[in-house]
Every structure is written in structure tokens, then in C-alpha cells.
Amino acid sequence: MKKPSLHTVRRTVQVVTAVSFVVIPLLNHFRISFAYGNFLSFRFFIIPLADPLAVLQIVLKNNYLSADLMVGAAIALILAGVLGTVFCSWICPFGLFSEWTHLFARRWGRKSRTIENKLTIPGFTIKLGLFVLGIVGFLVFSTTPVLNQLSLPAWYSRIFQFWFEQWHVSMAVLALGAILAIEGLAVRRLWCRYICPQSVLIALAKQVNPRRMRVCYDKDKCLCRQSIGHPCHQACSLGFDPKNVNRRLETDCTNCGECITACKKRGKALSYGFSQKL
């Protein structure tokens, strides 16, 4: 039996996660509650999960931190510290739709400029600046975790919570559609790379561990000779060249593994590894 590719495994996890957050509120509607919540706060049996940004806002504004919130945020941050920002590429449902939108835009008549433009400005630098401004604005002007309103995975999960609990269609449907339409027209994954505040803390968490999992490049095994446009570069929806990712740009990498899948068709120069070496 042929072993499924890394792409197939990842896509399966993404789809199962997206479908789960449709099914879970339906089960909750019928009083089946072994799992409940959304991408801000979730519980599976006795295991709590929480968005670290939501927890940070509660701590800063309300001086409150329950055991569930602490454990839930710690799980997310530890996962990032060991495996990198895999939440963005393996779990987040918006990431799935953003990737599909990008793929559709590239295939249907809009030539992607991600190869011509190497995107040398780190998206994390922009995200971090917006994050700091958002936190300052939150502390000065808000009494509630207002930055949660920028969580697109939470919007996605709340759509189905509102529907099955209140039979109400959330306006988040239109907002998500508009953001994806803009990304499709730009042929860029704009939100994930430059805006998403939820990804900032987990990206910072992975910097704590220099031996976290990352995509490693072995030049001696590389069979590609062209300097640009090689399969692993084309496979990256964020526009990175896996052969030439410096440490600042590596912060933006979500360990999706698409470059690894592309590379295995021609060699094995790229692979996951727990190493300080890029």
C-alpha cells in the first residue's frame, strides 16, 4: 500500500478540523458535549485549549488567570515551541481556505508574482508592529478582549455556533468571503502573512527553542540547478524560497511541508528536522 504524501496527510488534518467545528456545535445542540467551544476557548473531555492572545488580554485587563486558561494557552505555546507554527498550516480552517483561494487564483488566469518577488520583507515584522499597536489600543480604549474580533478561525467556528444555537446567520460569512476575495485578486495570502494577530504569540514562542522543528535544506542532495522557479519555491503559498530562507524569514514559515512534498518528487534535499541549522 502506497504511503500517503505529507500533503495528503496535512490536507486531511485541515479538512477534518474544519468539519469538526461544524459537527461539534450540532452535537452540542443535542446536548452531546464531550467537546465544546471555539478557537478562542475549547475543551475536549478534560483537556482545555485556549488562544494565547485571548488569555493575554484577560490577564492584562482583568488581572485574572484561571487554571484552564493557563493550561490551555500553555499547550498552544509549547506546541509552537516544539513544532513551530503548525497551528497555522495544519489546524487553522482559515489557513485552509486561504490556501485553496491562492491555489485557485494561480490556476485560473492570474499569474502569481510570488516567484518574481521574493518577498524579502518579513511579514512577521509587520504583524508584530500591528500587534503592538493593537495591544496598546486595547489597554487604552477597551474593557473587553477586542483583539479576539480579529481571529478568523474564531469567526469560522462561531458561524456554526450561532447557527445551531440561535438559528442566526453570522455576518462573519460575508467578512471571511471578502477577505478571501481580496487575497484571490492579489494572489497573496495577505492575512496570514501580514495581519493575523493570533499567530504572533505562537511565532514568538517558537523562537524560544532554537532546536524546534523546521524545514532543513541539504544542498548536497539538491537536484535542481536553476536559481529561481524551482518546484519547492513554487510550492510555497507564502512565496518563500526554501533554499534561501534566512533566519528572519524563517519566522514566517508555518512548517506546512509543501516544499518538502515538491522536493521529494525530484530528490530529498528538504526535510523536517529538529536543528538550529536552516
Image: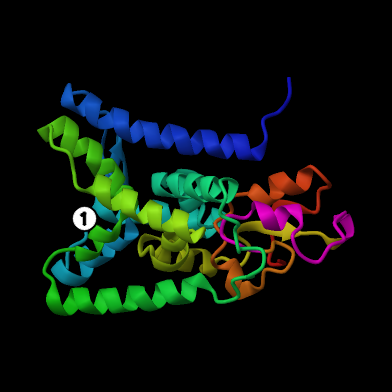
What is the crowding at mark 1: few (fewer than 14 residues within 10 Å), some, or many (at least 20)?
few
Residue 250 is covered by the magenta coloring: no
Q: Nearer the viewer, residue 185 or 25?
A: 185
Residue at screen point 44% across, 59% down = 192
Q: Nearer the viewer, residue 9 or 180?
A: 180
Predominant secondary structure, magenta span: loop
Q: How many marks?
A: 1
Which image quadrant for residue 252?
A: bottom right
Relative height, residue 240 to residue 256 (above, below): below
Which image quadrant for residue 198?
A: bottom left
Residue 227 is covered by the magenta coloring: yes
Q: Position of residue 53 (x, y in %)?
A: 31, 62
Q: Position of residue 17 (x, y in %)?
A: 41, 36
Q: Position of residue 78 (x, y in %)?
A: 46, 56
Residue 11: in sight, yes or no? yes
Question: Disc 1 marks which amino acid?
Answer: Ser
Which image quadrant for residue 265?
A: top right
Q: Position of residue 93 (x, y in %)?
A: 40, 44
Q: Nearer the viewer, residue 103 or 161?
A: 103
Identify the residue under disc 1: 66
Quadrant of the rendering where the N terminus is positioned: top right
Quadrant of the rendering where the C terminus is positioned: bottom right
Relative height, residue 106 to residue 129 (above, below): above
Instruction: Please state the extent of the stretch shown in magenta in the rendering.
Output: 220-240
Residue at screen point 56% across, 60% down = 238
Relative height, residue 198 to residue 42 (above, below): below
Which color scheme is applied?
A: rainbow
Residue 40: in sight, yes or no? no
User: Helix, strand, or loop for circle 1?
Assistant: loop
Residue at screen point 46% across, 44% down = 96
Q: Is residue 67 left or right of residue 127?
A: left
Residue at screen point 26% across, 54% down = 69
